[in-house]
Amino acid sequence: MYPVNITSAKAHLSSLLKEVEDKNEEVIIERAGKPIAKIIKYNPMKSINRLGIFKDKIKITKDFDKWSEEMATRLGIKD
């Protein structure tokens, strides 16, 4: 990881990006000696099927949305 000022980054952007891509180098862009941005290689996240992790682990009954008679009475939603 090394710092580059904005002027230099603008002038050499293509070569900086090539270094990031080929060497997995990180580049810090600075303004007046203070870091303002970091260029890093893009690594896409692996796609995961979040709901698929529960397959065959959770069973939903046909009456899952039915309240017990006592609870329905307490909630005032008795049919």
Image: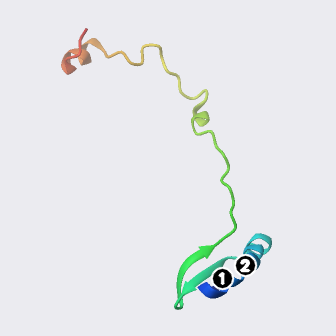
Location of residue 43 in the rendering, given as x and y in whole percent from the top left corner: 69, 60
Residue 5 appears in the figure: no
- The kind of secondary structure element at disc 2 is helix
Q: Residue at x 57, y 33 (%)?
A: 54
Location of residue 52 in the rendering, given as x and y in whole percent from the top left corner: 61, 34
Residue 1 drawn above or below residue 63: below
Mark 2 surroundings within 10 Å by alpha-carbon count, few (fewer than 14), some (14 through 19), many (20 or more): some
Q: Residue at x 60, y 36 (%)?
A: 53
Location of residue 32 in the rendering, given as x and y in whole percent from the top left corner: 52, 91
Seen in the image, is 68 located left or right of residue 23? Answer: left
Q: Residue at x 56, y 85 (%)?
A: 30
- Quarter of the image containing the N terminus? bottom right
Rendering quarter of residue 9: bottom right
Location of residue 34 in the rendering, given as x and y in whole percent from the top left corner: 51, 87
Mark 1 surroundings within 10 Å by alpha-carbon count, few (fewer than 14), some (14 through 19), many (20 or more): some
Q: Amino acid at mark 1?
A: Ala
- The kind of secondary structure element at disc 1 is helix
Rendering quarter of residue 33: bottom right
Seen in the image, is 43 located left or right of residue 75? Answer: right
Residue under label 2: 16
Seen in the image, is 46 located left or right of residue 70? Answer: right
Q: Are marks 2 and 1 in contact (CB under 8 Å)?
A: yes
Residue under label 1: 9
Q: Residue at x 53, y 27 (%)?
A: 58
Disc 2 versus disc 1: distance between alpha carbons?
A: 7 Å
Q: Amino acid at mark 2?
A: Leu
